[in-house]
Image: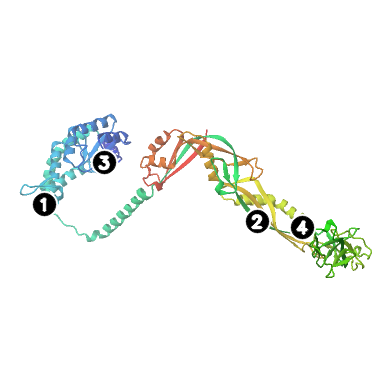
Amino acid sequence: MKNSTSEKSMLYLMYMNKEVIYLEPEDDITDILTKLQQAEQKLVALVPPKKATMLRSAVNMKLVARVAKECEKVAVIVTADPAIIKMAMAAKIPVAKTLQSRPVVPTPESVKASEIDAEVIDENGDFLDEKDSDSKKLKNPSKNASKGANIDSEAASAKNTNTLDLTEESLENDSEGSKNGKKTSEKNKKDNNKKSPKVPSLDKYRKWIVIGVVTAVAAIVVLVWAFVFAPAVTITVAISSTASNFSESIKFTTDPAAENLEEGILFAEKQSLEEHYTTDFTATGEEDHGNKASGTLAVSLSFSVSNATYADGFEIDMPVGTIFQTANGARYRSTNAAKMSWNGELPVSCTNGLINKVNGFCNMAATIQIEAVESGEEYNITGTTTWVPFETATVTNSTDITGGTTDMVKVVSQDDVDKVKAEQLEKNREEGRKSLLEDLKNNLIPIKDSFEAEAGDVTATPAIGDEVGENTTPNLKMTAIYSVYTIDRSKIEEYIKLKTNLANDQKIYSFGDPYFERFTSIEDAARLKTTIETGPTVTEESIRERVQGRKTGEVRSLLQSINGVSSVEVRTSYFWVWSVPTDPNKVTIDLKVEDR
């Protein structure tokens, strides 16, 4: 007895673990048989839609029975449709009214009962459809009570059955046993009619009703979250690729409008970075800060109007700052301006104090105030000093040039500033280069050999030429400008696509890290090099369309059948998620490229 009860309990658990297949109105018999064959459980419940026609055919129903037997499965039709129940009886397929009710092989009596349930006859003998049956039941309480008692007795009989045996043989035996159960139900109906029903009070159950409603609502919310919002799938697809080297000669242009990818001309844009540095240094310059010697010079020119040299006239211009030099190399500059000229016209007018006519010759003269270019006693000279002629004019000084003194002091020289500037650029060059390249946007590829470091504004304190006191440390502030030319990565990739011949079913998955060789200047050509990986044309969109709504196990086999796909991994958000959501936002596609 214990063994029998245990076996029946196992069968009951088997029924509770049945696989339910909801049939669609557009499904034909081929679709139904395919779904039955692909079912994973031994017991399969087929739920046809209302007014379905695909199972009202005796041939189709026999096909279902035969396929179920060949697959070693038990097929149960869940329906209350008399026509389908009648076909199931002919094919000896068990039928259940609901997914929770007990399945049995239909008998003529059960088919007749289902027809009565579908069409209710009123007192006048009119047939009612299912929509009107409830209202008619109110008009015939005695009939409905009798019929309800009969249904209740049948349900009670089903409940009193402790076990479920789901073999075809036992299901047929159950249908025969239902005949005997009908007699018992009729007896129970008579006993129930004798008892007067009691209407229970709902007040004592109000608390439990509220708890039940809240629990049901919470369960619905959890189920909606679990099966609508929570499901998400991540699909990782590994694709085999082939690596190859790319190398092409290109040219550059700094004009965006002149870019031409087909001819290999790429637009290069200069990127710059400014850094500011401050440093102390030691002044090494010396200057004589003594007084400068000064005096007066006489510049004169004597000429004959018949002299061909001066026939067309002449002009000697001596602006402020004109340099005059002695025969010994001492240099002086003028502090006032003067000019001597003749336009070549006759008669010559030797007047105005500048031109004196003597014995047919004209003598021009100008007085110039001068000072030594530098301080120093060596610029003090006598009135008999010989001077280098200025153009064609004679230079003399009739008086001594005096006042020059010597006072040597330490000053900031131009050489000092140039030296410190060069040292700062060299010292910070690599750091500036690194900072510049790190600050570049990800879409820019640098031409590294075009990197330059230049000095911008430079300020020395004390300034160049100023005296440096004993307690003073000179200071230099400078701006370093680092620059490099860059190419837009998208333009490089577009150029590589133009130069790479691929089959229609192939694509480039990666372009490596492009770089440039043999760069000398932006006006000259260079060579673009990189490594590209090519493989089959597989996109995230195409994969998402293929797997939408499919089971996870089916997704693996489907995607691995694509040429070039080496492996597929499907990860679900929760353990109860067995299929890919139809919402594309809940499906993540991760393409990974693997080298062969």
Q: Earlier in the sequence, mark 4 or mark 2?
A: 2
Q: Please give the label number shown on residue 417.
A: 4
Which of marks 3 and 4 precedes in the sequence? 3
Residue mark closest to the camera, 1 vs 2: 2
**Front disc: 1 or 4:** 4
The first of marks 3 and 2 along the sequence is 3
Q: Looking at the image, is mark 1 or mark 3 nearer the viewer?
A: 3
> At label 1, which amino acid type do we have?
Lys
Residue beneath disc 2: 274
Q: Are marks 1 and 4 in contact (CB under 8 Å)?
A: no
Q: Return the x and y of residue 243 as percentages of the image width and height.
A: 54, 35
> What colour scheme governs how the chains and residues are painted in the rendered image of this protein?
rainbow
Q: Please identify the quarter of the rendering in which residue 89 is found.
A: top left
Camera-near label (4 vs 3) is 4
When the figure is inspected, residue 454 is found, relative to residue 55, above or below; the finding is below
Checking the image for residue 136, the label placed there is: 1
Looking at the image, residue 557 sits to the left or right of residue 374; the answer is left
Which residue in the structure is indicated by mark 3?
Answer: 24
Q: Are marks 1 and 3 in contact (CB under 8 Å)?
A: no
